[in-house]
Amino acid sequence: MNISVKRSNNDEAQIYNVELENVTLLAVLNHIKTKLDPTLTYSHGCRSGVCGSCAVRVNGREQLMCEYKPGEGDVIEPIRNVRVIRDLVVDSSIVEHFNRAATAWSEGSHEGKVSEEDASRIETQSDCILCTLCYSACPVYAVNPDFIGPFALTRVWRYVNDVREESSAAKIASVQTNGIWDCTLCGECVPVCPQNIAPKQDITMLRMKSAMMGYQDPNAAMAFGGGLSF
């Protein structure tokens, strides 16, 4: 089996021939690293699809190396919209940056029991592993590098939708600029999520919640006279 890996030293793909079958891409790269080319550089951690550190693109689609099984002619490259450190290793500080921009964490919660129904409403979003595959798949960054992005916005919805959260209004306010209205709702983030989270749906719900709180799409306002009242 021949696979190509984009290398950062010359920005070109290097072809490796590997005689392995029915194994993960991570196993293939480990074989290349130990048997063929010790200079190949990539990231991994848990090897079980939980930590998200082995995110890459395969044939133009985002994948986790520990879950994807490669085939003949596959082309492996680093995820998009982020600085490449070396080969398939990227600067992951964007996770902290965008989570901070969106205050995507609990800032205080009410004490008390949570019903099964209430817990189920935030269960899916709580499964986010911050792998950044949705971030890589998002086309908005081509025009707006400050876009808060799908993984941070879906985490905001997780806390806004939590009955215990005390700062829901502040979180809604934090995603009005470079946030929910900048998303094109293209849905590219949905099929690449290894946890079956649908950021597009969560962003739509954040828009609805924002409208209920008196916010509006600034682009729509400009289209109808710049938001002026008559």
Image (tube, rainbow, N blue to C red):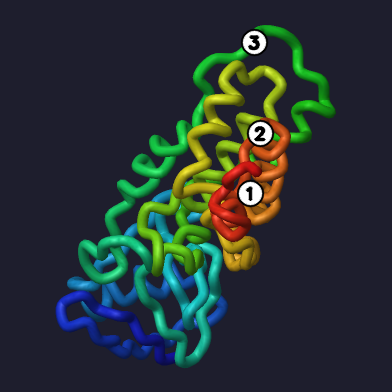
| Image position, residue 209 (x, y; %) | 70, 37
Q: Which of marks 2 and 3 is nearer the N terminus?
A: 3
| Image position, residue 41 (x, y; %) | 25, 67
Which label was assigned to residue 203? 1
Q: Nearer the viewer, residue 162 or 23?
A: 162
Q: Name the residue under label 2.
A: 214
Going 15% across and 77% down the picture, which residue do you hit?
9
Amino acid at dot 1: Ile
| Image position, residue 206 (x, y; %) | 65, 42
Q: In this view, does 230 lie above or below 81?
A: above
Separation of disc 1 and disc 2 at Cα? 16 Å
Q: Is residue 187 left or right of residue 77?
A: right
Residue 194 visible to the viewer: no
User: Where's the C terminus, which quadrant?
Assistant: top right
Separation of disc 3 and disc 1 at Cα? 25 Å
Amino acid at dot 3: His
Residue 227 visible to the viewer: yes
Q: Mark 3 points at which residue?
A: 110
Separation of disc 2 and disc 3 at Cα? 25 Å
